[in-house]
Image (cartoon, rainbow, N blue to C red):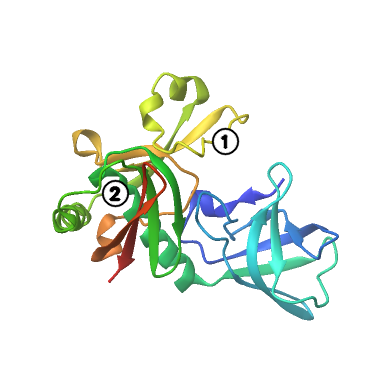
Amino acid sequence: MTTPLFRDDAYLRDAPGTVLSRTEEGGIILDQSVFYPTSGGQPGDSGRLTWDGGEIEIATAIKGEGEEIILVPSEPVNLPPVDTQVNQSIDWDRRYRHMRVHTALHLLSVVIPLPVTGGSISTEKGRLDFDMPTAPENKDVLNDTLNRLIACKFPVTEEWITEEELDAQPTLVKTMSVQPPRGAGRIRLVRIGEGENTADLQPCGGTHVFNTDEIGTVRIGKIEKKGRQNRRVHLFLE
């Protein structure tokens, strides 16, 4: 099991770690990880591991078996042996842009209150696919509404509920194709806003900014038809 340090502190950039094992493919599994693994449309973090007498560039992180997080080196070089104490550092600029885009996409799902069928995040842009039979009448209105929500400076926080509590509130789940992971007994929720001023509340395991003001201005780009009822809405950081 790898302790996901990013879950408690998305702003953590560096942390120590101990090598638990290495995979046959050349991946590295630590006891705790500041690297976010690819999931939910958000790319895995890149960065670097250093230790006494060595260092290695990490291209990405992926999920392994159970709660394992596997760090994937950029190239096949000498790996730190099992039980080695390492220091892990993520590419913070890249991660932070992922956090801004990810939080903006949550608000996009508020502006377009339709079931989400897919999504993707990168450093410059993101997109959500919606079950949207008819295209929006006025994209400029959506764009203005989204940027007004961002400018409200909503705090972004997390909370946890049981799987039974989620079952009693099925509307919290906006995604049709991906359901929150089960088996641990509890589900992480990300809340944008607070109390009666909550703009959004939904299950999510990704990393987010502390406040929507950090997102900055965004722009809704092309809206593409993808299938009979699906439409893909692109969002760009300005």
In the depicted structure, whether residue 96 falls above or below residue 158: below
Question: Quick one: quadrant of the N terminus?
Answer: top right
- Residue occupying image coordinates x 63% and y 65%: 60
- Residue occupying image coordinates x 50% and y 53%: 41
Image x and y of residue 123, in percent? 43, 69
The amino acid type found where label 1 is placed reads: Pro
The image quarter in which residue 80 lies: bottom right
In the depicted structure, whether residue 236 falls above or below residue 229: below
Image x and y of residue 133, in percent? 30, 41
Pointer 2 residue: 107
Q: Closest to the observer: 2 or 46?
A: 46
Residue 181 numbered mark, or none:
1
Residue 40 numbered mark, or none:
none
**Which element is circle 1 on?**
loop
Image x and y of residue 23, in percent? 82, 58
Q: Closest to the observer: 84 or 154?
A: 154
